[in-house]
Image (cartoon, rainbow, N blue to C red):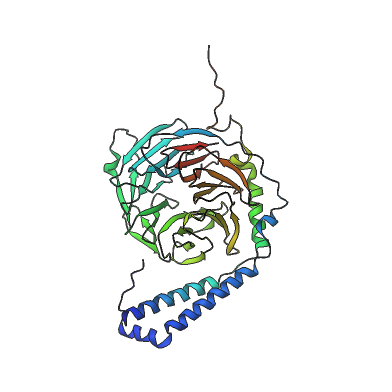
Amino acid sequence: FVSVSCCPSKMACQGLQKGETLASLKKESESLKKKLEEERGKLNDVELHQVAEKVEAVAALSLKTRRVLKGHGNKVLCMDWCKDKRRLVSSSQDGKVIVWDAFTLNKEHGVTLPCTWVMACAYAPSGCAVACGGLDNKCSVVPLSLDRNENLAAKKKSVAMHTNYLSGCSFTNSDMQLLTSSGDGTCALWDVESGQLLQSFHGHTADVLSLDLAPSETGNTFVSGGSDMKANVWDMRSGQNIQSFESHESDINCVKYYPSGDAFASASDDATCRFYDLRADREVAVYQKDSIIFGASTVDFSLSGRLLFAGYNDYTINVWDVLKGTRVSILFGHENRISRVRVSPDGAALCSASWDSSLRIWA
Amino acid sequence: MCSGSNSIIQAQKLVDQLQIEAGMERFKISLTAADLVQYCQEHRRSDPLLTGISASSNPFKDKKTCVLL
């Protein structure tokens, strides 16, 4: 949380007390909130699925499990694809981080972290390192060695330091900067080489559970979601919270940008996934069914943005037609909660990670 | 009066934040949704999970293997 000094200078204190009282400030924020609602309401001239009426329906998908990656001894909490479209990194509750070749099922590297619950892991854009962290409140970068016998844990370097668990991490467009989200309610941008904090992002009023960087063409923003039920969009350079969305009824577990960068999706404990249009500044779709009563933990888009893959606590993955708002498929196979779904960089496959200790590749 | 000025600072921050958000330029959904639909349509042919691609071009789908006798 923001640490506001309890006693600013006496003059500032008096200045604040002179001009604005707490009551008038509260009144102003209420009227601003109302104005925001009105402005957003004016733009709601049509629903997304209405605009998509003429679009042809999605043909039946024939997605099957093509690989099962076994090797973790405990819940798999996170995974990320390498840009080479075949390797991936996964992390689990027992502290293990494994790099796999998903084509051959070969385990190429393994690191054991001293902490349990490695909730976040990410592949570096170069493919030469991975970042990971969790209950240790840190995000560490581990260079991947070509020498199988080398002890990777010895080369591990602590980069990010939070005051609560690490919930998410992502390299920016190079290996040099790392963006993190934490249970301490903040996100932060770090220089990997020096470990220096470059920018911190304050605004969430509870644990931040997820973050996603805007596609590079869209510029320097990212979106975060948290236990305060809010999704916030941030300017990476200034640290400013530029947009905020509050329509979920429970924790937001995951946020992911639509491939064009003009929208993003979220997954929540309220059993819905939602779609937010950034230029209209409002929610434009809710993906839900009466029969879906368990929380959604993770979402990702297919390459064109037409399909939304969402993993749930009822062990299934629902595939949604983003434009029409309907469910097009259900993927069964995992034997416990889904913790993460990610489409491969070339869009050829979906990887899912689960509390059942395995990862599956679907295509 | 420390806790008093604390909540005033927080309240001022909230007002500043809301003013930034209120000042944002927004567009009608009829316009923005059309762009979202257009993006999907333009990229649908290069979306393997949507269109399905043959086993020969998808490395995860097993091909029938040749056996040299």
Query: How many labels were placed on the picture?
Result: 0
Residue A265 visible from this viewpoint = yes
Asked whether A87 or A230 is in front, the reply is A230
A358 relative to A138, above or below = above
Asked whether A216 or A358 is in front, the reply is A358
Residue at the spot x=51%, y=65% of the render? A244
Q: Residue furthest top?
A: B69
Residue A303 visible from this viewpoint = no
Residue at the spot x=58%, y=37% of the render? A63
A328 relative to A21, above or below = above
Q: Residue furthest bottom?
A: A18
Q: Report the side of A79 relative to A362 (left or right).
A: left
For the N terminus of chain B, the quadrant is: bottom left
Q: Residue furthest right?
A: A54
x and y, in percent, of residue A55 in the image: 70, 49
Residue at the spot x=53%, y=14% of the render? B68
x and y, in percent, of residue A301 in the image: 55, 48
x and y, in percent, of residue A339 in the image: 45, 46
B39 relative to A247, above or below = above
x and y, in percent, of residue A48 in the image: 65, 57
Residue at the spot x=53%, y=51% of the render? A293
Query: On the image, which quarter does residue A3 sit in?
Result: bottom left
Q: Report the side of B36 relative to B69 (left or right).
A: right
